[in-house]
Image (tube, helix red, strand yellow):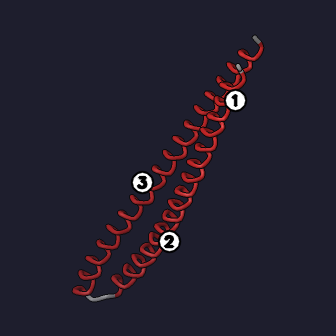
């Protein structure tokens, strides 16, 4: 019978769509985790910025030896701040790339699904 292979084909397409939906949900969860990490890094960044300001204020009022020590600490905090900002930027870029890849995959599967449906309709009309 002609309908049985078509039903199998539809079942296969439905399984593919469900698999893609599951993968999409997993990627969305990963994206949410990455967004949380970005927020945490941003909080750390803000903390380090506040610490750098506090150290700068102390340096302004400290004697020379203390000022030199504080400048070293400030340099270290600035390095940590730069590293944290680079981590945030990297996470954002990775998140954006992941979203783009997910959307591309979804668009591709939707196009393939539409093409197969059109083929199925054409075959049923014959």
* Secondary structure found at label 2: helix
Identify the residue shown where x is 64% and y is 32%.
110
Which of the image's four quarters has the N terminus? top right
User: Which of the marked residues, 3 or 1, is nearer the chain's N terminus?
Assistant: 1
Q: Please give left or right for residue 119 compared with residue 44 in the image.
A: right
| Residue at the disc numbered 2 | 43
Identify the residue shown where x is 75% and y is 17%.
124
Depth order, front residue of 53/21:
21
Relative to 80, residue 11 above or below: above
- Return the mark for residue 7: 1
- Return the mark for residue 90: 3
Q: Are marks 2 and 3 in contact (CB under 8 Å)?
A: no
Residue ranking furthest to the right: 125
Q: Are marks 1 and 2 in contact (CB under 8 Å)?
A: no
Q: Nearer the viewer, mark 3 or mark 1?
A: 1
Identify the residue shown where x is 50% and y is 59%.
34
Using the numbered discs, state the Cα–Cα distance from disc 1 to disc 2 in whole angstroms.
53 Å
Residue 22: x and y in percent read 59, 49
Using the numbered discs, state the Cα–Cα distance from disc 3 to disc 1 in whole angstroms.
46 Å
* Secondary structure found at label 1: helix
Residue 73: x and y in percent read 29, 78
Identify the residue shown where x is 52% and y is 57%.
30
Relative to 63, residue 111 above or below: above
Q: Are marks 3 and 1 in contact (CB under 8 Å)?
A: no
**Crowding near the residue tagged with mark 1, few <14, some 14–19, many ≥20 C-alpha atoms within 10 Å:** few
User: Which of the marked residues, 1 or 2, is nearer the chain's N terminus?
Assistant: 1
Using the numbered discs, state the Cα–Cα distance from disc 2 to disc 3 in whole angstroms.
16 Å
Depth order, front residue of 4/80:
4
Residue 80: x and y in percent read 34, 69
* Secondary structure found at label 3: helix
Q: Nearer the viewer, mark 1 or mark 2?
A: 1
User: Which of the marked residues, 2 or 3, is nearer the chain's N terminus?
Assistant: 2
């Amino acid at each position: 019978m002609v309908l049985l292979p078509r039903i199998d084909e539809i079942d296969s397409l439905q399984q593919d769509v469900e698999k893609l939906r599951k993968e999409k949900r997993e990627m969305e969860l990963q994206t949410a985790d990455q967004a949380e990490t970005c927020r945490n890094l941003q909080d750390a960044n803000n903390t380090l910025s506040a610490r750098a300001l506090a150290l700068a204020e102390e340096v302004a009022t400290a004697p020379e030896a203390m000022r030199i020590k504080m400048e070293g600490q400030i340099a270290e905090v600035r390095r940590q701040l730069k590293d944290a900002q680079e981590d945030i930027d990297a996470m954002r870029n990775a998140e954006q790339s992941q979203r783009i890849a997910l959307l591309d995959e979804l668009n591709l599967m939707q196009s393939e699904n539409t093409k197969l449906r059109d083929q199925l309709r054409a075959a049923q009309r014959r």
